[in-house]
Amino acid sequence: MTVDGIVVSVISGKDHGEVSILQVSGYLDTTTAGELENALYNLLKRDQYKIVVDLSGVTYISSAGWGIFIGEIKEIRSNGGDLKLAGMIGDVHEVFQLLEFHSILESYPDTKSAVTAFKQVSMPD
Amino acid sequence: MEKNFKREISALDEIFSFVDDFVTESRIDDAVAFSIRLAVEELFTNFVRHNTGGLDHIAISLKRDSNQLLIQLKDFQVEPFDMTKVKSVDVDLPLEKRKAGELGIHLVKSIVDKLSYEYSKRTLCVTAIKNLEEQDV
């Protein structure tokens, strides 16, 4: 594995309703976590609180990356939204479980199922 | 393998390359390699952020014998600070009481088998040992 930095892009569209998808790829460590933090901050600034983070292209996450999810989740939920993680690879998911983040954050095998979960919550009875 | 790295977060890229070289030379399994990177990053960033005083470099040593990996970081001319005594994250705490900054050491303690601290002659040394299973190499 080589260090390849990080690429963060935002996908919003009709297909996803109010849900924004943060697509992240690369290496999420102390030096790159700031880029994810900025992207997340920009979404919150635009009152977009329903967020799916697509981690399928992320090969490594240290505590600096996990800390961002914890740091922002309170504000997101207090505004009626949520942050759901999608597509974690095996090694990353193992750390997610070690930290017992599954009690805090929902995770899904892919972005489609994460977006669907938002839609199911939004559906009227 | 042992090498000195600048006491700054930007040294991490060089540190990851150093870890990659060690992993390749030692023919270590990908999952264990992931743990080594994680432990080294968390320990190094903790040294940079919390150790006071110090020379301009931190020494990192990686060794492997038949069934163990040894990760050792040394910081010279610093005040004592025993990170191994830092209270682990309480994973049962409600969300509003959790602190993001406590995650690093909690992670290291979770992924290695032994974490020890020594302080002598103003040199602080933290050693992490990870036991290797037969399938890890």
Image: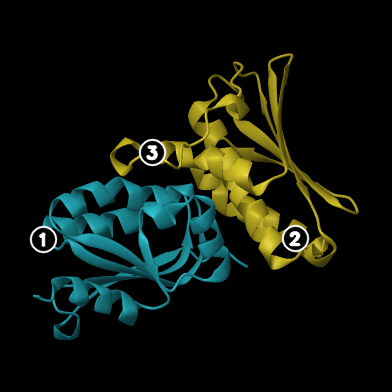
Chain colours: A cyan, B yellow
Please indicate whether residue A75 sits to the left or right of residue B85 in the image: left
The amino acid beneath tag 3 is: Leu
Of badges 2 and 3, nearer the viewer stands 3
Mark closer to the chain start, 2 or 3? 2
Q: How far apart are the two marked residues, 1 and 2, measured between alpha carbons?
A: 43 Å
In the image, is residue A87 above or below residue A62?
Answer: below
- Residue labelled with disc 1: A46
- Residue labelled with disc 2: B23
Tags 1 and 2 on a common chain: no
Label 3 neighbourhood size at 10 Å, few (<14), some (14-19), many (20+)? few
Q: How far apart are the two marked residues, 1 and 3, measured between alpha carbons?
A: 30 Å
Q: Do the residues labelled 1 and 3 touch (CB within 8 Å)?
A: no
Residue B11: where, in percent of width, then height?
Answer: 56, 46
Q: Are marks 1 and 2 in contact (CB under 8 Å)?
A: no
Residue B108: name its quadrant. top right
Residue B9: where, in percent of width, then height?
Answer: 50, 42
Closer to the camera in the image, A51 or A32: A51
Question: To which chain does the residue with label 2 belong?
Answer: B
Q: Which residue is drawn at 50% across and 46% down?
A: B10
Callout 1: helix, strand or loop? loop
How many numbered circles does the render carry?
3
- Residue labelled with disc 3: B93
Question: To which chain does the residue with label 3 belong?
Answer: B
Of badges 1 and 3, nearer the viewer stands 3
Callout 3: helix, strand or loop? loop
The residue lying furthest to the bottom in this view is A15
Closer to the camera in the image, B108 or A24: B108
Closer to the camera in the image, A50 or A27: A50
Closer to the camera in the image, A77 or B38: A77
Label 1 neighbourhood size at 10 Å, few (<14), some (14-19), many (20+)? few
